[in-house]
Every structure is written in structure tokens, then in C-alpha cells.
Amino acid sequence: MEPDKMTILSGIYYHELRYADLEQVEWVAKIPPMVRLNGFSAFEKGKGVYQEFKDTLTDKKVYVFVDNFEQQKIRLVQKDSSQLFLNLKDSLKTLELFEFFEEKIEEAPK
């Protein structure tokens, strides 16, 4: 983590997330139906770049870094409408990360 951004890294998949670009953070139980563009889903994990079914005619990408599909996931929406879903193996660490993103959104200039 850096003062203005973080790099989310999981295996060979990564995404640079600038805090100033964050618009919304929320909890979701399930991620929407998507097409995998690059990545994998196996057992309880999913990583990579996906696209929602409703956006298959556009180039909107959804970044997925989910360590456990059974647990709550954080959904981040950026100002360009791109989305990122993530959680960690440890649900308490996921909660801490959610609170961290909430603070970053509140701190951002309006």
C-alpha cells in the first residue's frame, strides 16, 4: 500500500487501485453472472478479468480477486464505472479492508 494507491496482487493477476478513483464500496453475497476473459475459477476461488453478461458488447472489465466465494465479498466501483470484487481467506481481514476503503472514499475530495 502506498499513500494514494494499492496494488492488489494474487498469483499472476494484479490490479492497481488509486484511492481517488473510488466511488463506492459495498458488501455483496454473490457476484453477478460473468464471462471470464482471463483468469480462473476453481473450488472456492476466482481470480482474473471478467465481464458481466450485460456488458459483453462493451469493453467494461470486472476484476475479481475472490479467495472464498462462500464469504461476503467487497464490491468496489470506480469513477469510470469499472468494478472490482474481492475478499480474503480471513473474513476479519476482509472486514478491515472494507473499513479501509470506506475511509478512503470519505477522505476523497468531492
Image (cartoon, helix red, strand yellow):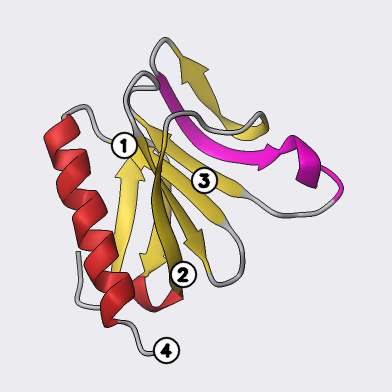
Q: Which residues are magenta?
A: 45-57
Q: Is there CB contact under 8 Å for labels 1 and 3?
A: no
Q: Secondary structure at mark 1?
A: strand
Quadrant including the N terminus: bottom left
The residues tagged by marks 2 and 1 sit, at their Cα atoms, a distance apart of 18 Å
| Location of mark 1 (residue) | 87
Q: Nearer the viewer, mark 3 or mark 4?
A: 4
- Quadrant position of residue 3: bottom left
The residues tagged by marks 2 and 3 sit, at their Cα atoms, a distance apart of 16 Å
The mark that comes first in sequence, 3 or 4, is 3
Based on the picture, tell me whether residue 37 belongs to the magenta stretch: no
Q: In the drawing, does residue 108 fall left or right of residue 37?
A: left
Q: Secondary structure at mark 2?
A: strand
Q: Is there CB contact under 8 Å for labels 4 and 1?
A: no
Mark 1: few/some/many CA within 10 Å (<14, 14-19, 20+)? many
- Quadrant position of residue 95: top left
Q: Nearer the viewer, mark 2 or mark 3?
A: 2
The mark that comes first in sequence, 1 or 3, is 3
Q: Secondary structure at mark 3?
A: strand
The mark that comes first in sequence, 4 or 2, is 2
| Location of mark 3 (residue) | 63
| Location of mark 4 (residue) | 110
The residues tagged by marks 4 and 1 sit, at their Cα atoms, a distance apart of 27 Å
Depth check: give the residue in front, 104 or 64: 104
Mark 4: few/some/many CA within 10 Å (<14, 14-19, 20+)? few
